[in-house]
Amino acid sequence: MRKRVIFIFLVAILFSGCASVDKSSLRRWPSLPVLESFKQDERVLILAPHPDDEAITCAGVIQQALKAGAKVKIVYLTNGDHNELAFIVYEKRITVRQGEFVHMGRLRQQESIKAMKFLGLTEDDLVFLGYPDYGTFAIFSQYWRTPKPFRDRLTRISSVPYKDNPSYGAPYQGESILSDLTRQLIDYKPDKIFVSHPADVNVDHKSLYLFLQVALSDLEGLMPKPKVYPYLVHYVGWPKPRHYHPELELYPPDKFIGSQINWQRLNLSFEELEKKYRSIFYYKSQTASSAFYLLAFARENELFGDYPALELNPQTTLKDKVISYFGFSEMSKESEDLESFKQDNLVEDKGQVSYAQTDDYFIIRVDKTKKLSRGFGVMLYIFGYSKDTSFAEMPKIQIITKGNKFKVLNAKKRITNSKVALDFSGNSLILKIPLEFLNDPDYVLTSLKAYHENLSVDATGFRKVKIK
């Protein structure tokens, strides 16, 4: 009886709020450019964090590429074995046994195989790596050359458990994922790559993008440079309205208006859209609880876009804080619907993130229109890349601030002699990070999340910032 009550309660949570539609979210963007057509014998690679991501974002890509005579391959980072709520709704039982999580991962793998066969692919076109669902960002940011690999807190597994997967037995460490992804890139040599977005709020989605950036950098000069098209899935309050609306176009979240992302669209024919719609229902374990959400991606078009890399020219001085900052983030909101934005994001004023460089420092600055309170803080990630140093040996920096205090971590280890400096005054927060502490990188991958007290109020996607 107790399990039944818990089950009903969880279902109520899953479906609460699904009926309302925010009409303001239907405001149209300016016309977006159309993705270039696929070509005969072109090699298309789709990187999916979980089974179903490839269908809701790229079912049209798959169909149009195959029609053009292109080759399509899909590589799945995880088997999606961590979606406990979907498991409860689908199988109507609660369990925390290790084998049940692996069972869920195998089930989701079979669902993807059936869905992709429906869209025209074969099982040989699909590669399931089987790394830990909801654990790959922790691996990317903390688990490189560590004595013990990452251990999933629910499954209590620390290596790939799927015997039929090519990565079976690989420890949950950064080297394993990077090596497997690199091997797939070398063997397939894709012309175009579709991958999860650096601004996606799901940790596996952003980590797959980060692993790809490192792998492509390592392979620079060893294979032709592919075009990369990130797709967005998880973003607060998007897409709206939920449920199936084939008559609507899919536009980016309003928060990206005025950002530097070069969005493009892939228009779908009626037949392609209908086939995409039908393919989504092969994921029965997910549609049992989330059909209203997954079907919201079955619209007139699919959507892709990435930030351009930022190139900084070293500045000569920081005297009197007079410095030219290059680059800005989506924390800057340029929309006439600002009041709605404030309410949705729990912030009271606009903010902007900027980046700069001197000969010795990488600098990040947060500006707000109101004076910063002592409860304001940020959590900053900085991952440096150098062609001369293995990425496993590069620092994985996390900086956490609150008011004028801060702490610095490299992976999981706290650093007390980093020489990082914080200037917290007025409307600005400025962090100065020595380039030597970052091991003099060629570029950094960085993102920032802002807090007030313990409440998250805003965040940026990961940006690639080149260092000179």
Image: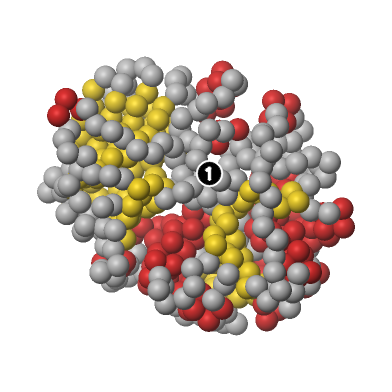
Looking at the image, which residue is at 60% across and 82% down?
164
Q: Is residue 170 left or right of residue 466?
A: right
Q: Nearer the viewer, residue 222 or 345?
A: 222
Q: Which quadrant of the structure image shows residue 387?
A: bottom left
Q: Is residue 325 above or below residue 33?
A: above
Q: Amino acid at mark 1?
A: Ile
Q: Is residue 231 left or right of residue 383?
A: right
Q: Position of residue 189 (x, y in %)?
A: 54, 76
Q: Secondary structure at mark 1?
A: loop
Looking at the image, which residue is at 61% across and 37% down?
253
Regarding residue 224, the answer to whether it shows in the image is: yes
Q: Nearer the viewer, residue 23 or 4?
A: 23
Mark 1, residue position: 261
Looking at the image, which residue is at 42% across and 68% down?
215
Looking at the image, which residue is at 32% across and 55% down?
443
Q: Which quadrant of the structure image shows residue 73?
A: bottom right
Q: Nearer the viewer, residue 83 or 340?
A: 340
Q: Position of residue 251 (x, y in %)?
A: 67, 40
- What's the image's color scheme? secondary structure
Q: Position of residue 221 (x, y in %)?
A: 40, 73
Q: Position of residue 403 (x, y in %)?
A: 26, 28
Regarding residue 283, the answer to whether it shows in the image is: no
